[in-house]
Amino acid sequence: MHEPDDEFSDLAALAAASGVTEPLRASRQVVRTDDGRETAAIRWDTADGREARITYLHGLGIDAHSFDQTAIAVGEPAVALDLPGHGRSSWRDDADYGASTTAPQVLAALDALGVPPGVVVGHSLGAILAGRLAATAPERVTGLVLVDMSPDFAQRAVDRIARALEDETPFASLEEVVDRAVEARVGDDRAVLLREARHTTRLGADGRLVRRHHFPHLPAGRTASVGRFADAWPDLEALDVPLLLVRGDRGYVSPKLHAGFTERLPDAEVVTVTARHAVQNQAPLELASAIRAWGARHRLLHEVQQPSSGTDRR
């Protein structure tokens, strides 16, 4: 059975699990840009009303809620976007969700949300998009954090993931969503997967659960595009701001890709944590600690003492 859509009901528990006594306040905001498309966002605010310092961009097939615990643990005012075609944001008629196509909509949404220049944190597809934003509007980006993604990740694997999302059939229950995720080796923490399932599905017309994102709803014979990830290399190599890669030790950035990344971007910092690809879901506190430490070194964030996380900088 699908739970009522009280999307912020468990934030107090996440804050307690993160050791945070005065958590940020979360609210939902949806803006319509000049192209007529809607972009949904979660705004993370402090009691003193400070401006957002971070923008979070999630990966393929998930939504802004994947960064909830990380955002709480980092503790900086922020916005987390539902990427075009995902969550509560509009679908595109052309089903083109590549970074070059969606970057203008995302930049327009950030303008409409009143987000000032700051750090952009992107996971997977969101990491590729983050690089495009930095190249398109460098004045907006003071630092870039890539979460478990290198542009060298095999394009055939990227396209295979997109096709798998398109082929996904409706679910009888949230438990079935979790079962399928475990079978697909997305993760093995059922509580984490259940939370993700609750946020990324909705009731369909027939009473079964369907994904909120566009991919499984395409007309027969249509496929979506997520662009060429390798096209992000010029964007990243042209950066003139601090860059951090946080990779999962069992994620998509293999040791070989890690070595290639540091060879091409020798000034980038790399932190390895114990996690699969969705680091922000599986190691949210370690990710938050890495972001805070890196941000403090580069004076990008407020200096707040954080507990040791056991991350491995290498």
Image: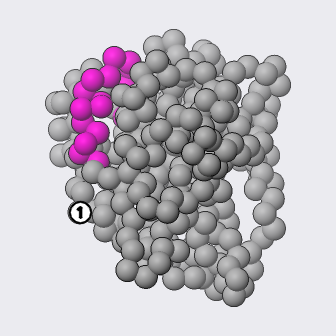
Q: Residue at x 47, y 23 (%)?
A: 141
State the image coordinates of residue 77 (x, y, percent, origin top left). Answer: 68, 28
The span picked out in magenta is 229-246
Q: Regarding mark 1 in the picture, which secondary structure is present there?
A: helix
Q: In this view, does 147 lie to the left or right of 213?
A: left
Q: Nearer the viewer, residue 144 or 135?
A: 135
Specify whether residue 199 is painted magenta.
no
State the image coordinates of residue 292 (x, y, percent, origin top left). Answer: 54, 25
Mark 1 surroundings: few (<14), some (14-19) or many (≥20) residues within 10 A: few
Q: Quadrant of residue 143?
A: top left
Answer yes or no: is residue 234 visible.
Answer: yes
Q: In the rendered image, which residue does mark 1 sit on?
A: 156
Q: In which quarter of the image is residue 147?
A: top left
Q: Nearer the viewer, residue 138 or 286?
A: 138
Q: In which quarter of the image is residue 234?
A: top left
Amino acid type at circle 1 is Arg
